[in-house]
Image (cartoon, rainbow, N blue to C red):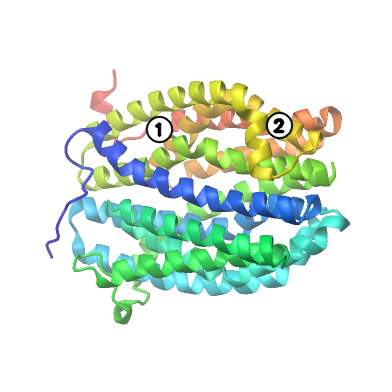
Amino acid sequence: METKQKTTLTQGSVARGMLLFALPIFISNLFQQLYNAADSLIVGNFLGGEALAAVGSSGSLIFLLTGFVNGVSLGAGVVVARYFGAKDWDRMRRTIHTTVALGLVAGVGLTVIGVILTPQILRWMGTPDDVLVNSIAYFRMYFIGSIAVVMYNVGASILQSVGDSKSPMRYLIAASLINIVLDLILVGWLRMGVAAAAFATIASQTVSAVLAFAKLTRSQEAWAVHWSEVKFDGPSLKAVIVQGLPSGIQNSVISIANVIVQSNINSFGAQAMAGCGAYSKVEGFAFLPVTCFAMALATFVSQNVGAGQPDRVRKGMKEIYLYSVVVAVAAVLLMRVAAPWMVAFVSGSSEPIVLENGARYLLWNAPFYAVLGILLSTRYALQSLGNKVLPLFSSVIELVGKVVFVVLFIPKFGYDAVILCEPIIWCVMAAYLVAVYRHDPFVFPKQEKR
């Protein structure tokens, strides 16, 4: 079956192709971060510090319960992109419909698990009593609608795997605006509490999921979704699980490590939680230039693996490494000038200790963004190259490293050790992943070694 190839990444300038593909991903994720920040900003201004701490600490728990599903979705996108690059339309179509079926099942399961387990997980994390009630309300509302989050990620992954990064961008812009308006009405005007902030997020994600699948179901291309064909195809399910399961496990291990650190942050009290929560919102923006190019690289590598072009993979990796260094330099300069202001803006807080905690986090982490860029791009590239197990070990390094920090360094050095925990672990993980990449037989076949 033939299809139009308007967005192939297997031909033309590597740098230009990745830039044009990554830019819409950057813009869409920018708007996603905006509506995440809107929750903190509006909650902090209208509901106070304890409510802000509840929302600000949401990232690690949400990622714990959604990370596995998102990792499998990423793996499915890698498989679809590889078939797209190889022009294998039949297997691509069967993989797409299997992925949609898997997303529906996973979304329902995540809703049930999240609603039931949220209170117990929050207690295991040592959430302070003055924050616990708001946290439970926020997370339960979020997980009631989590199927929308899962299905949007599935739809966006399919579109991006075939080179369409512009449509998800438009859908997230719409969702962001809806989320902000609902936050202002439900939280700012009606003062309905933190659960309303979660409802605004879920409602906006539902809109983006509906738009993504409207695009896919109306498409005339080979990657169109037909609901009558949504079912589990054995070989396709196996391909998705084999590719996606390591990514899902990796995300789960990383999220467990993050929950361990968040539990220690909780022990410092609500103001430390608010400061770290504000940092995480700013961090979401600061990471965008490296994370979005790394996400684009996953599709780029997958398509070129399918097309059998290792030279383009090597060139793309070199350019993304250089780009990561440039981003780190820009981040250092920006944080030195604007870190306190950015924390104040996203948190809506004027408490000096909250601003100081968040700003110090930003200033100390910014120089390591180059390492993070290399880490993420190499991990995504290895997964797209079909290396399923070795990238998983990097998440084990992260888990072990964070446990070591929690046991040995955070009790002794306090909040400073919390800040330095991730950058030091990034360095170890990046060194490991680059070493694995340099031995990949597709990118560096033996006859080309010097």
Q: CA distance from mark 1 to mark 2?
A: 29 Å
Percent across and percent down for residue 268 are 84, 41
- Residue at mark 2: 419
The local crowd at label 1, few if under 14, some if 14 to 19, many if 20 or more residues have their Cα within 10 Å, is many
Q: Number of marks in the image?
A: 2
* Location of the N terminus (image quadrant): bottom left
Left or right: 366 as drawn, with respect to 127: left
- Residue 91: tell me if it is visible: yes
| Residue for point 73% across, 46% down | 262
Quadrant the C terminus occupies: top left
Task: Indicate left or right for 187 with 300 as reference.
Answer: right
**Could you tell me which residue is drawn at 75 percent across and 60 percent down?**
135
Q: Which residue is rendered at x = 74% and y = 43% of the image?
A: 349
Residue 396 at least partly seen: no
List x then y, in percent, for residue 301: 31, 42
Residue in the foreground of this view, choosing between 327 and 237 = 327
Q: Is 325 positioned to the left or the right of 333 in the image?
A: left
Q: Residue furthest right?
A: 129
Q: From this view, report whether residue 31 is shown above or below residue 18.
A: below
Q: 43 or 124: which is nearer to us?
A: 43
Where disc 2 sits, the SS reads helix
Three-letter amino acid code of the residue under disc 2: Ile
Looking at this rendering, what residue extends furthest in the left direction? Answer: 2
State the mark number for residue 437.
1
